[in-house]
Structure formats: structure tokens, C-alpha cells
Image (cartoon, rainbow, N blue to C red):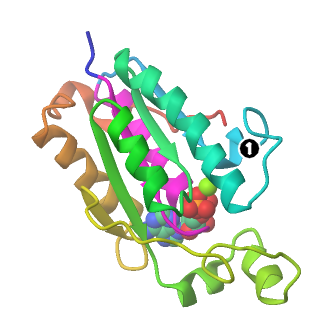
Amino acid sequence: MQEGFVIWFTGLSGSGKTTLAKEVERLLRARGLRYVQRLDGDVVRQDLTRDLGFSKEDRDENIHRVTFVAELLSKNGVATTCAFISPYRAARQTARRRCHNFVEVYVQCPLDVLIQRDPKGLYKKALAGEIKGFTGIDDPYETPEHPEIVVHTDRETVEESTLRLLALLEEKGLIPTANENTASAQVPAGEGR
Ligand SMILES: Nc1ncnc2c1ncn2[C@@H]1O[C@H](COP(=O)(O)OP(=O)(O)O)[C@@H](O)[C@H]1O
Ligand SMILES: [Mg+2]
């Protein structure tokens, strides 16, 4: 059976968690992994945790529920990617303890670059005080202390970050090494949410 694991992307809004998780998902399939599932805050918050907001309690509950799902998936051989701001260290620590083969990826990007990127216009609103409790502006983000890998999305391309991550998964024996039959170019970009 395929070895299950969890790649947990944490970082500020707009840092690149969703972008990287989608690309990793595509590359894992290209490596021949059949069971791959992405859990993404943008999606999960419209469904599994649609009743929750952004208070500390609700953020913790959001991560608690997602951890439950990631634990089940990873223990049953699924390559699971999680893309959540997950600003609180203790909640990430719990996820680490419960999930099988937990790999924490700190998606790092300076705030001034994020404010410039602002793909959803959220920083503009947060800076104008129209959104309260926005992580990095007027809500805390607890930096990972011992992530398995840090990616710097202001100075690395998506390809550079994802290839470094895949190399780490190879090193850990969680995925097969690349070979000519599974060249990523043969697999089209995934659709889906
Ligand atoms: N090296 C990079 N890695 C990831 N995203 C990048 C990078 N450079 C620029 N971007 C852009 O930054 C934005 C990140 O948005 P997104 O992935 O939705 O972030 P998040 O899910 O962390 O909120 C996208 O518009 C993406 O194209
Ligand atoms: Mg996202």
C-alpha cells in the first residue's frame, strides 16, 4: 500500500499555500501516487467548517476538525496536503502528533510583498480596518519553530519550492524517486477545488 503522509502548509494569507499545494498534488500524481487528497482552508471553510469564523476559538476548531480528517486519510495510505494559515503553534503541534508522517512546510513571505500581491484584496481591506482579526495585520501568526522545510515564496519560484519539497519526501522514503516514465510534463494541471 502507498505510504500515507501529511504535508502541512502554514503561512500568512497570500503566501502561496494553495498554489504550492495544488502543484504538489499534480507532481505526486505524476510520480504515480494514486491516493492524493488536498484539504484547503478556502474550500473547507465553505463546507466542513462553514459555521466557523476567525476568533482564536474558531480557528482552533477549524484546525481541530481538519486534523481529524488528515489523521484518518494519512493513516489509510493517502498522500494528504493541507493548506491552512493555521496561525497557532499548539494547534499545529496537535496535528503533528496525530497525523501519520507529518511534514510541516512554512510558507514564508515578507508582509510587504504580500501587501503588494494581495490577490484577493484582503490586505487592503484589513489595513483599512474593514476586516478585523486578519492574520499578520491585527491577529497573531506564530512562526513555526521546527518546520521540516521553509519555502521563501518571494525569492523562489513555485517550481523551485515544490521540487525541494519533493526531494525531501524522497529522502524520507515517502514517495518513489522520479524516473523517466513519470515525467511531470506528461500530467496535465489538475482541475478541481
Ligand atoms: N514563488 C511563489 N510561490 C507561490 N505563490 C506565488 C509565488 N510567487 C508568486 N505567487 C503568487 O502568490 C499568490 C499566492 O496565493 P495563494 O496560493 O492563494 O496563497 P494562500 O493560499 O497562502 O493564501 C498567487 O497569486 C501566486 O501566483
Ligand atoms: Mg489558500
Quadrant in the rendering for residue 89:
bottom left
Please indicate whether residue 184 sits to the left or right of residue 55 in the image.
Answer: left
- Tell me which residue sits at (21%, 41%) in the image: 169
Q: Position of residue 182 (x, y in %)?
A: 26, 28
Which residue shows up at 32% across the image and 60% down it?
161
For disc 1, the marked residue is 45
Asked if residue 111 lies in the magenta stretch, the reply is: no
Residue at disc 1, secondary structure? loop
* Residue 63 placement (x, y as % from top left): 57, 45
Based on the picture, tell me whether residue 6 belongs to the magenta stretch.
Answer: yes
How far across and how far down the image is residue 175, in percent?
Answer: 21, 30
Residue 22 in sight in this render = no
| Quarter of the displayed picture in which ligand 1 can be seen | bottom right
Up-down relation of residue 139 to residue 43 (above or below): below
Q: Is residue 58 left or right of residue 28?
A: right
Left or right: 23 in relation to 111: left
The residue lying furthest to the top in this view is 1
Name the image quarter holding the C terminus. Answer: top right
Residue at horizontal 77 percent and vertical 34 percent from the top: 47
Amino acid residing under circle 1: Arg
Measured from the top left, where is residue 65 in percent x and y? Answer: 61, 35
Q: Which residues are magenta?
A: 4-31
Q: How many marks?
A: 1
Instruction: Indicate the quadrant containing the N terminus: top left, top right, bottom left or bottom right.
Output: top left
Q: Can the viewer see residue 132?
A: yes
Local crowd size for mark 1, using a 10 Å CA cut-off: few (<14), some (14–19), many (≥20): some
